[in-house]
Amino acid sequence: MGSDHYFSRSPRSDSSTRTIRVRLAGRELDLITAAGVFSPEHLDQGSRVLLDVVPEPPATGDLLDLGAGWGPIALSLALRSPDATVWAVDVNERALDLVRRNSARLGVTNVNAVLPDDVPERVRFATIWSNPPIRVGKQELHAMLERWLPRLDDDAVAWLVVAKHLGAESLQRWMTSDLGLDVERAANSKGFRVLAARRATSYAD
């Protein structure tokens, strides 16, 4: 793709869609993807690991998928918590269009697929699920997490999946030291680590 990355705002690659079959929320689904977004050919292994180990999401409230791509995590949240409001956030406009189209295919009406600045500042999240875009670089990744993780509700948990060889341990240390979160290793599977981050008592005060 040359300089056309999945974290580009407006990918220049061919936007033709393809249909893939994926299992989400206990259902076999046919969803659409396209070039210029993250893992367009299949559900990536990191997201699969995350979805396999996280507990049931809160039934209500605002739920965040940070770095939504074509929507597997956001759609899982929406299907599992139909009375909640799911925010599918991405900087890639093609990815957001795919989330909207996939939501429509499934008859899902509780997903807001939006750019980061389109989430109202007042919104706080009952959970955050994310396969964060590690390859944007440490500075941008840290800025993204600094923006969103402090918006957890006091008793909420953020679940992040990170490949071990791409810095899962250093990210855990940084989230603890710089963001003041309580972070634990919730699972290790297939080269990925799932981190569970909560607001520390002193952080929430």
Image (tube, rainbow, N blue to C red):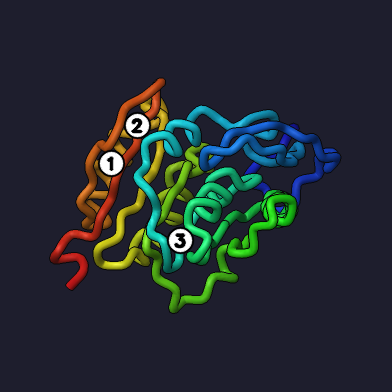
Q: Quadrant of the N terminus?
A: top right
Q: x, y percentage for residue 68? A: 57, 49
Going from N to C along the chain, the mark reached first, 3 or 2, is: 3
Task: Tell me if I can see residue 115 in this picture.
Answer: no
Measuring 67% from the left and 48% from the top, which residue is drawn there?
A: 8
Going from N to C along the chain, the mark reached first, 2 or 1, is: 1
Q: Are marks 2 and 1 in contact (CB under 8 Å)?
A: yes
Name the residue that disc number 2 marks.
193
* Badge 2 element: strand
Residue 115 as seen in the image, left or right of residue 166:
right
- The mark closer to the camera, 3 or 1, is 3
Q: x, y percentage for residue 62? A: 45, 66
Q: Quadrant of the C terminus?
A: bottom left
Q: Tell which residue pokes out farthest to the top in this image.
A: 190
What is the crowding at mark 1: few (fewer than 14 residues within 10 Å), some, or many (at least 20)? Answer: many
Residue 77 as seen in the image, left or right of residue 57:
right
Task: Tell me if I can see residue 130 in this picture.
Answer: yes
Measuring 69% from the left and 51% from the top, which residue is drawn there?
A: 106
Q: Tell which residue pokes out farthest to the front in this image.
A: 27
* Badge 1 element: helix
Q: Quadrant of residue 36?
A: top right
Measuring 41% from the left and 29% from the top, which residue is drawn there?
A: 163
Q: What's the distance in space between the residues labelled 3 and 2, CA to CA?
A: 21 Å
Measuring 74% from the left and 51% from the top, which residue is drawn there?
A: 105
Q: Tell which residue pokes out farthest to the left in this image.
A: 202
Q: x, y percentage for residue 143? A: 43, 56
Name the residue that disc number 3 marks.
63
* Badge 3 element: strand
Residue 45 as seen in the image, left or right of residue 29:
left
Name the residue that disc number 1 marks.
172
